[in-house]
Amino acid sequence: MAALPLDGVRVLLGVTGGIAAYKAADLVRRLRDAGAEVRVVMTEGATQFVTPLTFQALSGNPVRTTLWDSSAEAAMGHIELARWADEVLVAPASADALARFAVGRADDLLATLVLATAAPVTVVPAMNRQMWAHAATQANVALLRQRGVRVLGPASGGQACGEVGDGRMLEPADIIAAVAVGRGPKTLEGLRILVSAGPTFEDIDPVRYIGNRSSGRMGFAIAEAAAAHGADTSLVAGPVALPTPPGVSRRNVRSAREMHDAVLAAAPVHDIYIAAAAVGDFRPEVVSASKLKKSGEPIRLDLVQNPDILADVASLDAPPFLVGFAAETDELERYARGKLERKKLDMIAANQVGNDLGFECAENALLLIWADGSEQLERADKRVIAAALLDRVAARYRASSKARRA
Ligand code: CTP
């Protein structure tokens, strides 16, 4: 029988105050179904939405709500609880919880545990879209990320408050899949994977450039999942403000030509190259050394074509297994299959852009296409999609003539 994804993993689940707290009940049940042992800590606010008894019944363990519970402290004190956990998961994580974790507060049990644990911490934000978009929340999330806290979601869609936008808690199944990726079997052990991610910037003058809307998140999620699955992972990143995923070796570049040089230098020693970058197709023919001044006249910018990185990697003597991306607004499958053939790729991951998908958002859906088949990966958090993509890439790589034979 296949091992459960979280077999024997001790998950400390923090539940904070928000309407999504009711979904945490289902999360507990599913975590246990996935093999985890679960202990729940609720904030004062969370108990206004769901009773501790619900979580006690579902987790099979006593629920803690306060630092000042003398009988609980005698049984399993807060430091022991922090040490007990293999994973700390906070779902839903309210705006207040994120702010408190970011500041490093220790005046309630959950915040104290987040400080006191050596286990990986994952937060799953859920809140009204305005609260999520607020600069204060975004700054808190950025700080937490920088410190290595994993942030899952939020997803976008209808909200309990009647508004529509980013702020929904990820579905329990997606949360479990993302946590499992971090702990899962090292299915890519021994493979060297190169990923390119983010946009490229083509300078016009010292202050202006031509760029694109790629956030880099899909490529970073792929690199993170590749390293988590045991691959020796290198990332060539265009200009993005994302932290380097754990265990990944990163090289920063700016222009398409810099990315070209970095990727071509690295490709020969990699087994798989996943080209998730949105490479600028054109660059200004001349980069002005000083800032262009307006004169009242129209200005003309001559653009020349950039090298095609994937096509050049494909023409190497022994190219790695090649996975390209195709972001399309129309006729997804037809254009993507055309690119697969034209660029001599082993697989292409096609995504529809627009309609809140693809660029600048946390979710994606991909249509994977290879010479004699295809598979749709349904819309999910980019981390979940990245893990599923890598599974398929590994399987197709092993079946291909490019696979290294031991
Ligand atoms: N790509 C690349 N080098 C370029 C342009 C694109 O390596 N100069 C890669 C991208 O990283 C992606 C794939 O090619 O994996 C497809 O990118 P896309 O821009 O969709 O394809 P193009 O060939 O540029 O096609 P078009 O712009 O005509 O849609």
Image: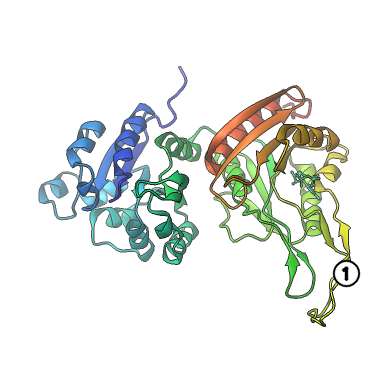
Question: Is 214 drawn above or below residue 28 in the view shown?
Answer: below
Give me the residue at 46% from left, 37% from top.
174
- Would you place residue 255 above or below residue 54 in this image? below
Q: Position of residue 206 (x, y in %)?
A: 76, 75
Residue with the most extreme top position: 1
For residue 51, side relative to residue 124 (left or right): left
Q: Residues within 10 Å of mark 1 (few under 14, many from 20)?
A: few
- The correct choice, above or below, for 143 with respect to 379 in the image is below
Which residue is painted at 74% across and 67% down in the image? 209
Spot the residue most to the left. Answer: 71
Residue 100 location (% of width, % of height): 33, 62
Residue named by callout 1: 286
* Nearer to me, 343 or 397: 343
Residue 275's image quarter?
Answer: top right
Q: Which quadrant does the N terminus fall into? A: top left
In the image shown, does 237 or 381 lie closer to the viewer?
A: 381
- Residue 360 is left or right of residue 86, and the answer is right
> How far across and how far down the image is residue 318, in percent?
84, 36
Residue 9 visible at all = yes
Kindly identify the amino acid type of the residue bearing the numbered disc 1: Val
What residue is rendered at 65% in x and 45% in y? 353
Q: Quick one: 285 or 390, which is closer to the camera?
A: 285
- In the rendered image, residue 45, in percent from the top left (x then y), is placed at 23, 53
Examine the rendering and report whether any part of residue 274 can be seen.
no
389 left or right of 58 in image: right
Q: Label 1, secondary structure: give it.
A: loop
